[in-house]
Amino acid sequence: MKYKKTLATLIALSITGMNMLPLPALAKSKKNEENKVIKSQIAQYQIDYINMPWWETFNDEYLNSYIDKAIRNNHDLKVATLRIEQYRQLEKMQLATELPTVSGGFAPTGLKLPGQTNTSGMWAFPLMVHYEADIFLKNRDKTRSAKKDWEKAKIEERSAFITVASAVGSTYFNIIKADKLIELQKEIIKDRKEIYELMSERNKVGLTSTADLVRANKAYVSAQADLLDLEKSRTTLLNSLAVLIGESPANSASLARASYDDSYLVKVPESIPSEIIDQRPDFLAAEISVEKAGIDKRAAKKEFLPRIDLIGLVSFGSSALNTAFNWSNILGLLGASAMLDLFAGGRKVANLKLKKNQFEQALENYYKTNLTAIQEVNDSLVALKQDDKKYKTNLDVYNLEKEDFAYSTHKYDEGLISYLDLLQRRENLLSMNKLVVSNKLDCNIDYIGLYKATGAKIQ
């Protein structure tokens, strides 16, 4: 009785000190906290993938927010992240082949012999252990190969993040360019309409030929068609940006962006270090593919060696259930075998040749990836430098065009030229401005291309 009271007191004290939250809820709460920590860690390494400080040099809050949304919401990136877990589980499955397998169960049996009328039965509880002795490390090589797939998936995830971030940046700046070009095109349409109306009035009094009037009308209609093309292009770009950041294209028109005048003009690097190519995801992935192919080739050679198996069996059995676990009713077996395929129809030879072929392919792809990486970095740097020069040259021409237009305006004020002449020269100024706008934002897009070509390692 004394012991029962003591036990009851201890139980009461333990209940009093407990949080009354149900155990499943406690476990769930703890799991949620762990998930939050994991997600924050994932977000951080994904930010590291894309070199976020580089994007911040554009000084554009809208662009930064879209990059952040793409990291968290883009479905292609979620697939790339899930694929890592897929290959991780495949590696674990392969690792299991290196370990013993243990199986147990319940196997009741009944028996009737010929010529007898009675039957007998047995209650059996077998426990079996099987292990392939991996003395030649064949299964170990297969696990290493599976691990290479996992490592490659992680590198491909980084590549996917860089690709999506680059697409977001390029699309964003193309939208800003389209905004400004549409604004300038509307000004051109306005001027061409005025030119057409003035020429129509002049044609009525015989001061302008009908052919010139038709050409003015054609220019006006053509400008309207160009505006439609620009608006169509902007809508397509907005839809693309919406999908990239994981939002519905139905809301793409509401996507905010900076104005052209606030756009950052990039600084052109003089050169790119050659060792930066070694950090490109495709180069690292190609390197891992060669390593994996080499391991697969080695494992294919080991398929020609004997397979050594160890088997252990313990079984409790008796005709009476209450005596099944008596020591006298135990059946034990321990065995080993070394088996070598004497004929497999050429399967192993073909498999070895296949793995050798795949190794050669991986090696050639590695060499090609190295050359392609050098080419892409050089092409991106040249494109950026040339477009920068083009922008500066056309900017000088635009400034000269502005001076010329100011001089024409002064001449118009003095009555030396007609308003029609002034409008035509203003159209030249607007057309030159469109070219400058395109050149400036092409430099930003080229800079993003260089960022992608260097594997986001550009400073």
Image (cartoon, rainbow, N blue to C red):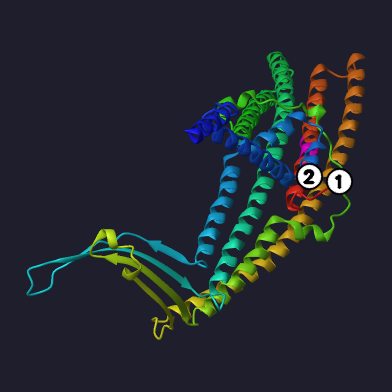
According to the image, label 1 marks what residue? Answer: 268
409, above or below 396, in the image: above
Dividing the picture into quadrants, the one containing residue 364 is bottom right
Q: Main secondary structure of the magenta part?
A: helix
- The local secondary structure at tag 2 comes to helix
Dividing the picture into quadrants, the one containing residue 215 is top right
Q: Which residues are magenta?
A: 438-443
Residue 123 rendering spot, x and y as whole percentages: 26, 62
The span from disc 1 to disc 2 (Cα, nearest Å) is 8 Å
According to the image, label 2 marks what residue? Answer: 447
Residue 376 rendering spot, x and y as whole percentages: 74, 56
For residue 197, the mark is none
Please state which amino acid type lies under the numbered disc 1. Val
Return the disc, 1 or 2, that comes first in the chain's sequence: 1
- Determine if residue 314 is in view: yes
Tell me what residue is drawn at x 13 percent, y 69 percent.
Answer: 112
The reply, left or right, for residue 120 in relation to residue 139 is left
Q: Are marks 1 and 2 in contact (CB under 8 Å)?
A: yes
Q: Nearer the viewer, residue 237 or 340?
A: 340
- Determine if residue 71 is in view: no
Tell me what residue is drawn at x 86 percent, y 33 percent.
Answer: 398
The 10 Å Cα crowd at callout 1, few under 14, some 14 to 19, many 20 or more, is some
